Image: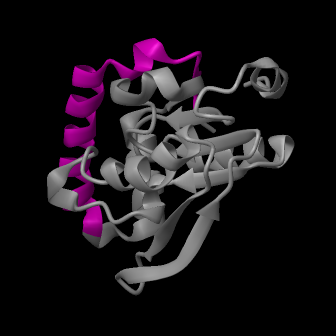
Amino acid sequence: MQSPVRRIQALQPSCGPVRLVAVDGPAGSGKTTLATKLAAELGCQVIHSDDFPIPWDEGPDAWFHALDEQVLRPLQQGRPGAFRRYDWHRAEYAELVTVPPAPVLIIEGVGTARRSIAHLLAFTIWLEAPEEVRLRRVLDRDGPELEPRWRVWMEAEQAWFAADGTRARADVRELGC
């Protein structure tokens, strides 16, 4: 994908003084890799959905309220947001992460470009990859013992995206790296 940096920089702020950029798509599609690269080019912060606890059995919608309440709402008012990052390895909350009202903020993860905040998004990138590639990536990262959970999750996210219409609203749609 050609970098959308100039397009993003040319946009007006969308969430208070911030140009809010979402990188969304199914698990294992390359969202984190792309968001990290884009953040380096833009010199901005990235918030990952994995920074929040996401219950396996509640699906892609369960985590977002924390991001909305603790980060997006304060930013809309021009104030800094903050949240406690969740440490998945220790299964507990870790450090406090401050989110200043900077020129650009990237939110990355399943459900970040949801319809309910479309009015706050300056730019949306949708990534996808074949299911077998995505499954291999998440199992390589998280371990093969989680395959049954990942299969259920992938069904839940497919239903989520279909109901939300996320892909259709994206400014850019690409195959993930």
Estimate the x, y position of residue 81 in percent, counting from the top left. 55, 57
Seen from the viewer's position, the closer of residues 78 and 103 is 78
Identify the residue shown where x is 31% and y is 54%: 63
Estimate the x, y position of residue 96 in percent, counting from the top left. 55, 75
Q: Is residue 52 above or below residue 119?
A: below
Q: Is residue 48 left or right of residue 18?
A: left
Image quadrant where one finds the N terminus: top right
Residue at the far top in the pictured view? 168
Q: Is residue 107 above or below residue 70?
A: above
Estimate the x, y position of residue 92 in percent, counting from the top left. 37, 83
Seen from the viewer's position, the closer of residues 50 and 34 is 50
Residue at the far bottom in the pictured view? 90
Estimate the x, y position of residue 14 in percent, counting from the top left. 61, 26
> Does residue 171 belong to the magenta stretch?
yes
Seen from the viewer's position, the closer of residues 26 and 16 is 16
Identify the residue shown where x is 34% and y is 48%: 64
Seen from the viewer's position, the closer of residues 131 and 74 is 74
Q: Is residue 32 left or right of residue 50?
A: right
Residue 124 in which image quadrant: top right
Q: Is residue 169 left or right of residue 162?
A: right
Q: Is residue 143 left or right of residue 177?
A: left
> Does residue 133 belong to the magenta stretch?
no
What range is drawn magenta here?
A: 146-175
**Colour mapping:** one colour
Identify the residue shown where x is 28% and y is 23%: 164
Q: Is residue 20 above or below residue 81?
A: above
Image quadrant where one finds the C terminus: top right
Identify the residue shown where x is 58% and y is 33%: 15
Residue 50 in which image quadrant: bottom left
